[in-house]
């Protein structure tokens, strides 16, 4: 089983739609969680961290369910510019604090 | 925000040659740098963790003699792909961690081995 798993998609949604991505992780000792956005042929950019209580940043809402070991990202009122690949990342802890990435979910927002 | 640069951004080389990729943190000191590799339509796979002044820690399945990592200063880490072959063609991305813990990614280096 992969350490971090995501549905690869692709998700094709119309502008204005609400779309949700889930990501599961296998290591119960994982300490911190993130969503990254990666545009084609670019490096990933941090979208938001995911906190236990859930957190919101504009149209984006992230949630963490430690009991079920999954994190989610909700995008409301999707824009054309939201088209990208969304990667979840999990920090295993330890001194190096390495990130393990999911395979990414591709989102295309259609006009 | 903090900036991490990589050089070169593109490399095309013949099979058997060695390629060096530089990763620099431009406005902060990075005690730890990470090297990732990403094949098309796949996720970033951590190759190794590099600490300034010490040997890199390689992930399982990554050959340390093939992917030489040097982290000689707090702002520079290099990855050398030795005797590159077509299967090494990939997108190589570094990440630098500042003291506060935030990680910043470099823009990546695309390697194509013919």
Image: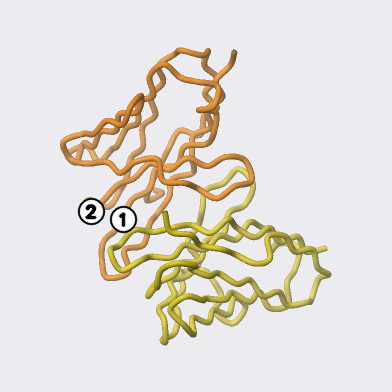
Image check: A29 left or right of A12? left
Q: Earlier in the sequence, mark 2 or mark 1?
A: 2
Q: Chain of mark 1?
A: A
Labelled pair 2, 1 in contact (Cβ < 8 Å): yes
Q: Image quadrant of residue A67?
A: top left
**Tag 1, which secondary structure?**
strand
Q: Image quadrant of residue A97?
A: bottom left
Q: Name the one closer to the observer, B102 or A88.
A: B102
Give how far across and how far down residue A66 sits, in percent: 19, 41
Quadrant including the N terminus of chain B: bottom left
Give how far across and how far down residue A65 sits, in percent: 21, 36
Give how far across and how far down residue B96 sits, in percent: 44, 65
| Residue annotated with mark 1 | A91
Specify few, some or many for label 1: CA neighbours under 10 Å numbering under 14, 14-19, or 20 or more.
some
Q: How many marks?
A: 2
Task: Name the disc covering residue B6, or none.
Answer: none
Task: Write down which chain is painted orange.
Answer: A
The residues tagged by marks 2 and 1 sit, at their Cα atoms, a distance apart of: 6 Å
| In the image, residue A8 above or below residue B111 | above
Quadrant including the C terminus of chain B: bottom right
Task: Name the disc covering residue A31, or none.
Answer: 2
Going 47% across and 46% down the picture, which residue do you hit?
Answer: A45
Image check: B19 left or right of A19? right
Going 43% across and 71% down the picture, which residue do you hit?
Answer: B49
Task: Write down which chain is painted yellow.
Answer: B
Image check: B113 left or right of B81? right
């Amino acid at each position: 089983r992969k350490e971090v798993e995501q549905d690869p998609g692709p998700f094709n949604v119309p502008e204005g739609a609400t779309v949700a991505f889930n990501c599961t992780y296998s290591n119960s000792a994982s300490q911190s969680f993130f969503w990254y956005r990666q545009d084609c042929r670019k490096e990933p950019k941090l979208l938001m961290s995911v906190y236990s209580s859930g957190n919101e940043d504009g149209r984006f809402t992230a949630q963490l369910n430690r009991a079920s070991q999954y994190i989610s990202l909700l995008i409301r009122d999707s824009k054309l510019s939201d088209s990208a690949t969304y990667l979840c990342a999990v920090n295993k802890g330890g001194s190096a604090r390495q990130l393990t990435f999911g395979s990414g979910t591709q989102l295309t927002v259609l006009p | 925000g903090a900036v991490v640069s990589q050089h070169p951004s593109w490399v095309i080389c013949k099979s058997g040659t060695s390629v060096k990729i530089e990763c620099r943190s431009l406005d902060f000191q990075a005690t730890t740098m990470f090297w990732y590799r990403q094949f098309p339509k796949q996720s970033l796979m951590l190759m190794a963790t590099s600490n300034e002044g010490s040997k890199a820690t390689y992930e399982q399945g990554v050959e340390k003699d093939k992917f030489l990592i040097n982290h000689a200063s707090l702002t520079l880490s290099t990855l050398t792909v030795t005797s590159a072959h077509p299967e090494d063609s990939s997108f190589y991305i570094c990440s630098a961690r500042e003291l506060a813990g935030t990680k910043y990614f470099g823009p990546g280096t695309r390697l194509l081995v013919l």
